[in-house]
Amino acid sequence: MFFYLSKKIAIPNNVKLKCVSWNKDQGFIACGGEDGLLKVLKLETQTDDAKLRGLAAPSNLSMNQTLEGHSGSVQVVTWNEQYQKLTTSDQNGLIIVWMLYKGSWYEEMINNRNKSVVRSMSWNADGQKICIVYEDGAVIVGSVDGNRIWGKDLKGIQLCHVAWSADSKILLFGMANGEIHIYDNQGNFIMKMKLNCLVNVTGAISIAGIHWYHGTEGYVEPDCPCLAICFDNGRCQIMRHENDQNPVLIDTGMYVVSIQWNHMGSVLAVAGSQKVVTQDKDVNTVQFYTPFGEHLGTLKVPGKQMSALSWEGGGLKIALAVDSFIYFANIRPDYKFVLVLCNSIGTPLDPKYIDIVPLFVAMTKTHVIAASKEAFYTWQYRVAKKLTALEINQITRSRKEGRERIYHVDDTPSGSVDGVLDYSKAIQGTRDPICAITASDKTLIVGRESGTIQRYSLPNVGLIQKYSLNCRAYQLSLNCNSSRLAIIDISGILTFFDLDARVTDSTGQQVIGELLKLERKDVWDMKWAKDNPDLFAMMEKTRMYVFRNLDPEEPIQTSGYICNFEDLEIKSVLLDEIMKNPEHPNKDYIINFEIRSLRDSRALIEKVGIEDASQFIEDNPHPRLWRLLAEAALQKLDLHTAEQAFVRCKDYQGIKFVKRLGNLQSESMKQAEVAAYFGRFEEAERMYLEMDRRDLAIGLRLKLGDWFRVLQLLKTGSGDADDSLLEQAHNAIGDYFADRQKWLNAVQYYVQGRNQERLAECYYMLEDYEGLENLASSLPENHKLLPEIAQMFVRVGMCEQAVTAFLKCNQPKAAVDTCVHLNQWNKAVELAKNHSMKEIGSLLARYASHLLEKNKTLDAIELYRKANYFYDAAKLMFKIADEEAKKRTKPLRVKKLYVLSALLIEQYHEQMKNAQRGKVKGKSSEATSALAGLLEEEALSTTSRFTDNAWRGAEAYHFYILAQRQLYEGYVDTALKTGGHMTEALHLRDYEDIIPAVEIYSLLALCACASRAFGTCSKAFIKLESLETLSSEQKQQYEDLALEIFTKHTPKDNRKSELDSLLEGGEGKLPTCVATGSPITEYQFWMCSVCKHCVLAQEISNYNFCPLCHSSVG
């Protein structure tokens, strides 16, 4: 970090200044002095011209107003930035609050206690409250609108300083005797502050300043010290908070008058005076420190007595009140960078994590060198393409030994294999730390704080030479042939050292290295030219000088950091401007300056002519100047001069171009070519078209890749080769739109360019699957694009289209896999059968068992059903129905499950018949084939109960529910018939596995009782009492109930005949109506085509669906 004085403003009549304060937001500077002097000033800054940005303007002040109102000397000035107010007080205790109105400052409020003098005033962080302390111990806290919040008298205490904490909860009061007391914001005493920096200090001391940074711009790092307290004897402490037991301690070694943090709490300025042995008077000095007490630099200021200092809001300037002057100093900050290797467009190539703190970094074509205070690390990051065989040999040798090494600054490496990556070296301390480094391809220079400079060889690091200087280097820089070293020391003095000169010193010894005579002050940046060892540029205050052989050219006004110097051009970067908004840099902040010889040559060529210019360039040769001449000669079509100049700047392409121009006949053709060479393409194209050479115009645009223009040119005429070119142009424009993800526009051009591959991609991106399908169908069989299109369909789950595409390119296996992947098992089975693949059954079984393991039985059923494996599906379905029946859940649900199982069995029967039909086609009648199908099915199914009569379960539950429903609706007789049908089923077959007998007979007894058919009722009771499944208590209960009923009623039926025929009609069993539960005695009845169950003819008209299997009534 560098500091230099840049401006001085004199106060009229030599009035001595007492205080100064710079408004951080609006940039006003208030200064107070003797005899009631109070001024508000504002520096004008230039922003119109980018080159001059950040410079203090020559036309000095945009505001200079004297504020009348104080009589005594003004001692305290303080700004309230949030509310644009200025608060001032004088030696008579008068306080005035000023406000800005239409560009001028006016009194807003006045207050005078007439008792004592104001020693300090402080606004809190949000500008809402002000605390005023008087010498006699009075404290007043007021609000921004002038109301008093509270007041307090601290008896017997002389106050001289006050500060708010960032959260406005704590007040610090500084006493005249040097003590600091901590109070809360209501004025209650908390404790005395412990002042570690005053240990072992004797004699009277006073507080020079208390400044608590409020954190408005963030902190340098978490838990950063922000409360600075300084005493007149030069002792300072910087604390993290008011109770910090371990503050940062600094002894500035000077007499201090004032301290202040910069706008972001990263630099503390301490102003005062220092004794110098050689002079009898003290020298005014400003010292700069980090929050952690590291010394950043020193600024010496002329004049007798410095009284105050204040930072500018951006932290790049500082105002100092000295005698009757305000001095302004500029600060050139160091911007921190990170160690990531990038290419020229900023793409990170190779980050490195290293265990030393990279305080100093240098980079050459092949190495990166990073140094901490004790050690330096070298990393060979690549083997350059343009190295000689010898250099490559050296480098590859070092590559085997390891491309990263670490060296301690006190070691003396010989250049052989002694560098290793041993971070323990970095931990060892040194008495003489590193303060700067620089490197070229062959040499590494390390500067140390004592003034010693160590020279090492590269790439094999060996210590060659030590030189000693009488200054501490801050920045080192080697010229392009490593013969001279430029040194900027910490006070901004630039000197030069010739590394290889052999001179005889005062003792007659011959030494290597000589300090050159040139010395410049206030230098904060410098760069050597990359292509000339005697050329360099440097920044001195706000001027840039270019030196050739140590002689300066006239300066250029700028405040940029020099980034690069080659080809007689200097690239400068306005880092201060960029850092104000680093996320959105502006191109205007990078400026190119041409040096004098380039400017002169250009002027000569323009004003005088090529002959004289080439003579001047002959005397001052430089490739860049030759190129300038070559280009000027080309413009004038002076091919001879152009060729010579291209030869002198070794531009092979240029020489070839001139040769080609020489072969052209027409003048206008040459001009067109030259226009194209200089990038004036519109002009060149216009010339070509005027010559009626559309082909050349098209060729030009093709080289530039301007396909839109190519297309326009192609459409304006016709030619033989145009068709293929048109296609190419359409495709290129399609690519242009596709790269920008404008798929719709891309499609239009790809269609015209017949580019099927990119079309497929665009349709996919646009989710235009219809377009994709049409494209697939338009492609010939086995086209290489078909599998890709199929995959696109697979990704979006479009099975049918994917299968079509796969089959078209003859990949049935992929088609089957797709069906399996998308769970289209029936399609998969069908494809597998059509293309006689064996493995689909095993695939299916594997997937089904996987589903069953996960307890997803219904998914497994669905899987089998989709794959037309009805038999397996039905087996699983019956299993579920049986389980549900055992659980005694809702009977309707159980019935539905049984119906589903039965339907699956019916589909299975149908499938078997069809399969047989297919086998015996054309041999015999339908009947035989159906019979054969049934026989085969019989052989397959191992007489399992549900294939024989699939509908039993459904029937059982159907009648069970029907009987209940009829009973509850009051149709007692029909209910009895329905119930009777179920019991008959019980007689005929083993029915107990579906509905427990208890429930059936209980229902029958209930129905019989309700319809007063006591005979049937008694039979039901006999059955119930003889059931083995009941416990003896339950049987007892049934017996008691029977006794109760039959003592009142005789067990005889009223309408015997009907029921008897129902319960006893053995062989000639009648079909039962599934709608009413009654037996069907007529010959006319309806039969369901699916479940083959019957309904009475007169009943069916009430139904749209079969009452049992719910299939529609045809």
Image (tube, rainbow, N blue to C red):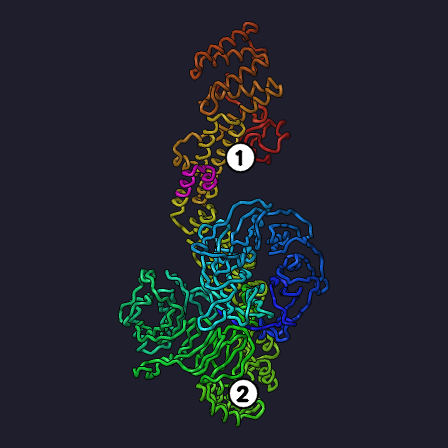
Q: Is residue 945 left or right of residue 680?
A: left
Q: Secondary structure at mark 1?
A: loop
Q: Pick whichever, 564 or 966, lies toward us.
A: 564
Q: Is residue 44 magenta?
A: no
Above or below, 904 against 415 in this view is above
- Which span is picked out in magenta? 846-864
Above or below, 617 against 773 in this view is below
The disc placed on residue 1090 is 1
**Residue occupied by mark 2:** 600
Q: Is residue 979 left or right of residue 82?
A: left
Q: Pick whichever, 543 or 618, lies toward us.
A: 543
Q: Are marks 2 and 1 in contact (CB under 8 Å)?
A: no
The disc placed on residue 869 is none
Q: Which quarter of the figure has residue 87? A: bottom right
Q: Which quarter of the figure has residue 415? A: bottom left
Q: Main secondary structure of the magenta part?
A: helix
Tell me residue 564's x, y (percent).
48, 76
Q: Residues within 10 Å of mark 2 (few under 14, many from 20)?
A: some
Tell me residue 1014's x, y (percent).
55, 11
Front: mark 2 or 1? 2
Residue type, mark 2 in image: Asp
Tell me residue 950's x, y (percent).
47, 31
Q: Residues within 10 Å of mark 1 (few under 14, many from 20)?
A: some
Q: Is residue 415 left or right of residue 75?
A: left
